[in-house]
Image: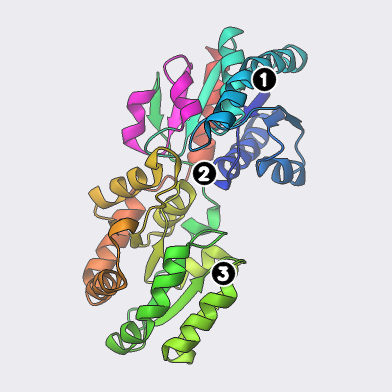
């Protein structure tokens, strides 16, 4: 099997793509070629994983200036031609688009070349690249049910999450409560600013509670200083620029306060953790809010809108959740029911079925 995987940009696109690639190699000994851009995370992560990567020149169309948008529109036909040449040279049996800058041109070239195409969509509301090709692809694998309507032959498979997130041990019933604050690798500025303001009151109101806060490299020092100045018991909170071994960090948490990017909520579902979600308002097409709405509708999370959130509202919401242990555990079970432990295998099998068809 020869498979071209196109897209990336952010970890939410490229990490699932790498998991799908691993499943394709394990199950079908697939020969793989990735297509991405120099500005995306794929430029670093794909070669690190041992895969070939071809770079194309294509930019953003969403949340950018008119000049950047015009430049992207001018580059788009050339990037499609570039991808067509790659397809003729590599001759893939199937092209998988995972969303992101490079996904659109590669998928368009594959569709025009009558090559089987599979779109993978991690968000409840698809990104622009997948929306453009959604009705022309041969099939689609989506993370959330609301995304089904944007594609032909779509099914809910979930997106791949590392196996260790599905193997976590339940929290001991008598363990002190623990709050994990996870703003992604860059941190979430609104959480970095708000949490130190309420930390002392929160810890006073919930006996034994501990806080573990990932603030991001750029904001870790100022966030730690703000906690220290708050008067909160220094033995009961920690601030880190970055947390490694995230599966174990999730295992030790009773509640996760986070953004609602596709990878983050997929990990929360796999770990069976209740969440308080604060969607990033600058996310393209407001997709983080739509991801959070799916979780809220399933009873697996609560959501606060950043523009409406005050420290007082954050404190009130956290206290309400942390003081209802039974509901927290029920939310965790609802979250786990949304998870898809075999997502990578299922997506690889769909790709194989397209080739056989």
Q: In which quarter of the image is residue 21?
A: top right
Against 355, is 338 above or below? below
Question: Residue farthest to the front?
Answer: 67
Residue 161 image offset from top left, x and y in percent: 52, 49
Residue 294 image offset from top left, x and y in percent: 30, 45
Residue 29 image offset from top left, x and y in percent: 70, 30
Against 244, is 268 above or below? above
Residue 70 image offset from top left, x and y in percent: 57, 24
From the viewer's perspective, tell me whether residue 333 is left or right of residue 114.
Answer: left
- The disc, 1 or 3, on the residue closer to the chain's N-terminal end is 1
- The disc, 2 or 3, on the residue closer to the chain's N-terminal end is 2
Local SS, label 1 = helix
Local SS, label 3 = loop
- Using the image, tell me which numbered label, if any, was put on residue 219: 3
State whether residue 279 appears in this view: yes
Q: Distance between the residues labelled 1 and 3?
A: 37 Å
Neighbour tally class for label 3: few under 14, some 14-19, many 20 plus, Cα within 10 Å? some
Q: What stretch is highlighted in magenta?
A: 127-150
Residues 339 and 90: in front is 90
Residues 126 and 23: in front is 126
Mark 2 and mark 1 residues within 8 Å of each other at the beta carbon: no
- The disc, 2 or 1, on the residue closer to the chain's N-terminal end is 1
Neighbour tally class for label 2: few under 14, some 14-19, many 20 plus, Cα within 10 Å? many
Q: In percent of the image, x 22 and y 73: which residue is there? A: 320
- For label 1, the residue is 79
Q: Does the magenta stretch include residue 201?
A: no
From the viewer's perspective, tell me whether residue 16 is left or right of residue 283.
Answer: right
Frontmost of labels 2 and 1 is 1
Q: How far apart are marks 2 and 1 (CA)?
A: 28 Å
Neighbour tally class for label 1: few under 14, some 14-19, many 20 plus, Cα within 10 Å? many
Mark 2 and mark 3 residues within 8 Å of each other at the beta carbon: no
- For label 2, the residue is 160
């Amino acid at each position: 099997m020869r498979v071209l995987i196109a897209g990336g940009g952010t970890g939410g696109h490229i990490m699932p793509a790498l998991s799908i690639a691993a499943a394709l190699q394990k199950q079908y000994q697939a020969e793989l070629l990735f297509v991405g851009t120099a500005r995306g995370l794929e430029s670093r992560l794909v070669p690190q994983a041992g895969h070939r990567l071809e770079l194309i020149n294509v930019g953003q169309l969403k949340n950018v200036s008119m000049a950047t948008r015009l430049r992207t529109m001018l580059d788009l036909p050339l990037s499609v031609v570039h991808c067509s040449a790659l397809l003729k040279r590599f001759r893939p049996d199937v092209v998988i688009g995972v969303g992101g800058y490079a996904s659109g041109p590669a998928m368009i070239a594959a569709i025009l070349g009558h090559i089987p195409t599979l779109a993978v969509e991690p968000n409840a509301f698809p990104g622009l690249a997948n929306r453009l090709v959604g009705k022309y692809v041969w099939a689609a694998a989506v993370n959330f049910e609301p995304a089904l309507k944007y594609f032909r032959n779509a099914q809910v498979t979930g997106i791949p999450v590392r196996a260790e997130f599905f193997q976590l041990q339940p929290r001991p019933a008598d363990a002190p409560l623990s709050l994990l604050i996870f703003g992604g690798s860059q941190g979430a500025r609104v959480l970095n600013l708000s949490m130190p303001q309420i930390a002392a009151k929160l810890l006073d109101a919930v006996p034994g509670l501990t806080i573990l806060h990932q603030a991001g490299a750029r904001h870790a020092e100022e966030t730690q200083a703000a906690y220290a100045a708050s008067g909160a018991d220094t033995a009961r909170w920690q601030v880190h620029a970055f947390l490694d071994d995230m599966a174990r960090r999730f295992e030790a948490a009773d509640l996760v306060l986070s953004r609602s990017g596709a990878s983050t909520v997929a990990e929360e579902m796999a770990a069976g953790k209740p969440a308080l979600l604060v969607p990033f308002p600058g996310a393209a097409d407001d997709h983080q809010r739509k991801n959070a709405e799916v979780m809220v509708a399933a009873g697996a999370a609560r959501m606060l809108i950043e523009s409406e959130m005050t420290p007082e509202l954050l404190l009130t919401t956290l206290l309400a959740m942390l003081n209802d242990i039974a509901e927290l555990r029920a939310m965790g079970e609802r979250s786990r029911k949304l998870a898809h432990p075999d997502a990578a295998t299922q997506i690889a099998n769909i790709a194989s079925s397209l080739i056989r068809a």
